Image (cartoon, rainbow, N blue to C red):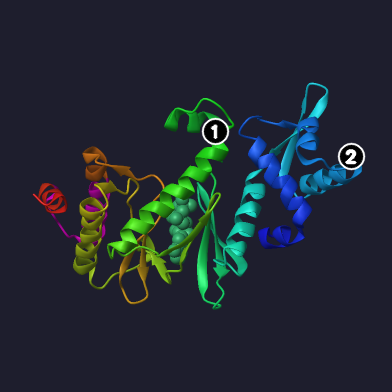
Amino acid sequence: LTLAERASLVGPLDYKVLKTIYELNSNYEYVPYSVIINKLGLLERELKEVLLKLYNLKLVSKEKVLKETGYRITFAGLDTLAIKKLYANKVLNKLGIIIGEGKESNVYFGYDFSDETIIVKFHRVGRTSYKNIRKIRGIKYKEDWIKLTIENAEREFSALSCLTNNYANVPKPLGQAYNAVAMEYIQGNELYRTNLNNPEEVLEEIISNVRIAYQYCGKLVHGDLSEYNILIREDGKPYIIDWPQWKKDDEDLLFRDLTNILYYFNKKYEIYKDIDQVINYIKGE
Ligand code: ADP
Ligand code: MN
């Protein structure tokens, strides 16, 4: 089943149970059955049926806790809550097909209420392995993953908001719910698979967008700037995407971002720019 199909199978009562499990997951890694039933006041038979449905749709996982079964929301479960909320908020009218499965996200086409194509990005932190995440962010508990995933969506949304307000070339953010960010669809290709006929201009424009972030969004630094996170729109304009890992006021990170980009343009287009000069320009010194 596709994500859209699964979401359409989730009725109001299923949604309520799923949301309750999600909320209780901040206290329980696996929420015991008895806790769920106490919280919701449903009939045994009713609740068991819903839980089985959620489990079969892979929206929750389960594990034995002491003498009962415990439940935990899955990434697909979070995606479902997010879709329903984006529908309710009138951001999204219909979810379309998946266009990309990245290392920390699934990206889908969607359609808004004017039938315009939009993008819905579902964050998924820690998909690779527990150990990696623990190392990267210093996290102690598995429970924190849900929180971290949602935090990433919130972080991406807030960066895109500031950047858009300051006229940077980024996808306009349209809404955020749980682990999802809805944004403008940029029709084009990633920089790494585009042959530019005006590389100098494009590089200048990328640098001036990095400058806008730094100057107008509180020394905002992208943190993962590369030829993979820049889309070249059909009219040739570069758009910087994929913002959840931003940091503020981090000069080493700014240096690294620019090194990546300058290296790419040097290697592919033989353009040379002095990095110190570029950094001074960005910092406005
Ligand atoms: P990640 O790399 O963390 O999975 P990205 O934000 O880089 O997430 O998105 C993955 C891919 O999805 C991009 O390389 C791009 O092909 C596509 N994509 C993401 N956002 C947009 C957008 N606003 N418009 C068009 N395509 C997008
Ligand atoms: Mn990316």
Q: CA distance from mark 1 to mark 2?
A: 30 Å
Amino acid beneath label 2: Glu
- Please tell me which residue lies in front, 170 or 129: 170
Residue 264 inside the magenta-drawn segment = yes
SS for callout 1: helix
Label 1 neighbourhood size at 10 Å, few (<14), some (14-19), many (20+)? some
- If you read the primary sequence from the N terminus, does the residue marked by circle 1 or circle 2 appear first? 2
Label 2 neighbourhood size at 10 Å, few (<14), some (14-19), many (20+)? few
Q: Identify the residue position indicated by label 1 in the image.
A: 144
Residue closest to the far top: 66
Q: Identify the residue position indicated by label 2 in the image.
A: 44
Residue 162 inside the magenta-drawn segment = no
Q: Quadrant of the N terminus?
A: bottom right
Amino acid beneath label 1: Asp
* The quadrant where residue 229 appears: bottom left
Residue 68, image x and y in percent?
82, 27
Q: Considering only vertical position in the picture, is 261 above or below 8?
A: above
- Range of the magenta residues? 257-275
Q: Is residue 19 left or right of residue 244?
A: right
Specify whether residue 14 is in view: yes
SS for callout 2: helix
Residue closest to the far right: 45
